[in-house]
Image (spheres, rainbow, N blue to C red):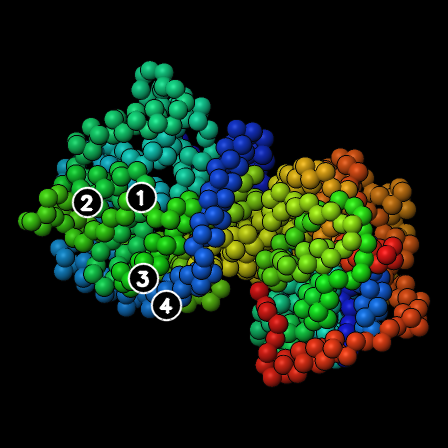
Amino acid sequence: MKVSLFITCLSDAIYPRVGEAMVRLLANYGVKVEFPTVQTCCGQPAFNSGYWDEARATAKTILEAFEDCDFVISPSGSCTGMIHHYPKLFENDAIMYEKAVKLQSKSYEFTQFLVQVLGVTDVGATFPHKVTYHPSCHGSRLLGVKDEPLALMSKVKGLEFVPLPFAEDCCGFGGTFAVKMSEISGAMVSEKSDHVKETEAEVLVGLDMACLMNIAGNLRYRNEPVRVMHLAELLYEGVKQA
Amino acid sequence: MSSGHGHSDGATVKERADLALNNDFLRKAVKFTTERLKGGKLKATEEHGNWEEWRERGKQIRLHTIAHLDYYLNLFVDNARANGVHVHFADTAEEAVHISLSIAERKQAKSVVKSKSMVTEELHLNHALESIGVEAVETDLGEYIIQLAGETPSHIIIPAIHKNRYQIADLLSEDAGEKLEPDTSILAGYVRRKLRAKFLEADIGMTGCNFAIAETGSMVLFENEGNARMVTTVPKTQITLMGMERIIPSWADLEVMATLLPRSATGQKLTVYMSGITGPRRSADADGPDEMHIIIVDNGRSLQLGDPEFQELLNCIRCGACLNACPVYRHIGGHAYGGTYSGPIGAVLTPSLQKNVAEWDDIANASSLCGACYEACPVKIPLHEMLIYLRRRKIESGHGDKVEAIGMKGFATVMSKSGRFKAALKLGKLGQKLVARNGEIRIKIGPLKGWNSVRVTPSLPKKSFRDQWGTMEAEIRNGLKEMDPDMKNRMEAIVKDRANGGGHGHG
Ligand code: SF4
């Protein structure tokens, strides 16, 4: 069984620790993750802005990188969701279309893979902190990743889970939206931070570093002492501590 | 409508949004009501117990109807005519206005009472009526308020959502010439008394239509205040304006819609009043108009037919759930969208109805593509995807922003080869030396201006994931555990299932 990591350009460049946590956690289960280095970015920034030729040029690196593996795992519901758009993106190219459909059927967001494929909910972690969770829109709405992260957290020893009010509201990231409509985006992320603060949680976790970068950036700007991390990081840290 | 379109000022969505973001009254009022409606919907759909299945039924009914729209429209028209209704077709807004005005002139009408019609807003019909000296009076409470204020609706079903109780009390007090307390029942009571006289003197009743039933040629109205009933029964002449897509095949289909619409709109199990009107008054009827007209309006709708990316827009039942669910709408309200229809549905409908990519599509950028609209929609219209198609059509038609286009070309050049991506990361690490402090970038210039005015940006760490991979891989290989045979079997079964055409759940 060949399992390959789709790190996403953001985690590759800025949050390598997320990829490391995933890979090391999975090694505990005998999953030897591969990392095909021809991958770059899923193409979402171009796709969502309407530049589909540019998106295709980028998406090709992903289609090539994961052509021969059995499972693709990624620390982002949004970038996995982008792979789900590949069939539409290549609808006028029969060969690429077929590759796109194949890739879509084997692509998993990290917690989906852990829970649905490996059947793991208790990773044996201990994390004695008050934690809240922001479900990113693309992962939860478009991929349907809703129960998996909650199931994983419920098994972490010492973890006190506090639900985030209005959790399902978008954090306001939206890729180029945050730049083009920066005032609206700013209003959205400020509201999100208010809700995070209300929970009095020490830690905010999520499944998408883009959204977390957005929220963390605002929390930091406001000097709120909330630690922001990907759930994979939390689990890995918790396993090391246990 | 004294101020024409009554939108907030500002040439672009961004400018109008910025105005709205600085209007605390508006933001509080919109937030308060959308949250209440959203909560109501959530409760109502949970209580329903089988919501997803009904949503799918609703979608299928709409898909089927729109796919055979000419058939069902013909059926509807034949049946309506057999019931004694005068049916008119209007290709454009101008035609629809012209037909309405001719009826008013022929009837020598002095006043029209109106209810429940976003289509007449789309046509700016009140303005046209006033221009020939016919008074047009809105009789839905919210519409009445908006008309007094000289504005346009900022929500499909709650036209005055952007006003709070005190602002409404001020408007109505001025209308009444006496101070009215900001109490909903007092205010509603005043409007009801005021309108009673208007109903009695009106020559024409004018409404929209929630659903038109093809099998009997009937039109159905959903409402909560009872005024639409008055509008359709008291005046001697009745005019219904309906978008050409309002059709559903049968009364059995209405059952599904009557379940989906009120729950999605306000969280009500059923609407308070549901009127089905099948032709003008017959001799045995106690009330009803002597003459009834239905004007079927195209105005850009048929442009969506046969367009695989946008045809589903015609499935919309105008419940407003997508507005209530939308976080962007919550912050900027409806007027910022600049069209008759606001929120996610408006952002797609406005440009689509006008096939006007160049001017209107900046609304398509006012979305984070979070998909809350799609999730809320009782007939599952993929608005979040349509927004992307609109953006693409703008680029394809050459109306894109030149600077952005260069940026995207650069993005594709760097990202289409991993070697170039690696080189770019190296360059970035060099470049950020100028601006990064303690792992953070706080400058507020260039592309980071908007972003960094409420955020701090992380800088690039010394080593990217790909830089670390070699060492990490060697360590992992050494410490790898044996895989549990059960786990291995599961994985193999999934791969096998996939080869047989199975796959895991896709959104
Ligand atoms: S798009 Fe869907 S949710 Fe929005 S108004 Fe239409 S039917 Fe309602």
Q: Which residue is mark 1?
A: B272
Position above or below: A120 against B234 = below
Q: Which residue is mark 3?
A: B253
Q: Chain of mark 3?
A: B
- Mark identifier at residue B64: 4
Left or right, A181 with reference to B293: right
Mark 3, secondary structure of its residue = helix
- In space, the residues marked 1 and 4 are separated at their CA atoms by 28 Å
Residue at the image position 65 percent from the left and 52 percent from the top: A135
Task: Confirm or reject: label 1 Cβ below 8 Å from ligand 1.
Answer: no
Mark 3–mark 1 CB contact (< 8 Å)? no
- On the same chain, marks 3 and 2? The answer is yes
Number of the front mark, 4 or 3: 3
Q: Is residue B9 visible?
A: no
Q: Nearer the viewer, residue B494 or B187?
A: B494
Q: Chain of mark 4?
A: B
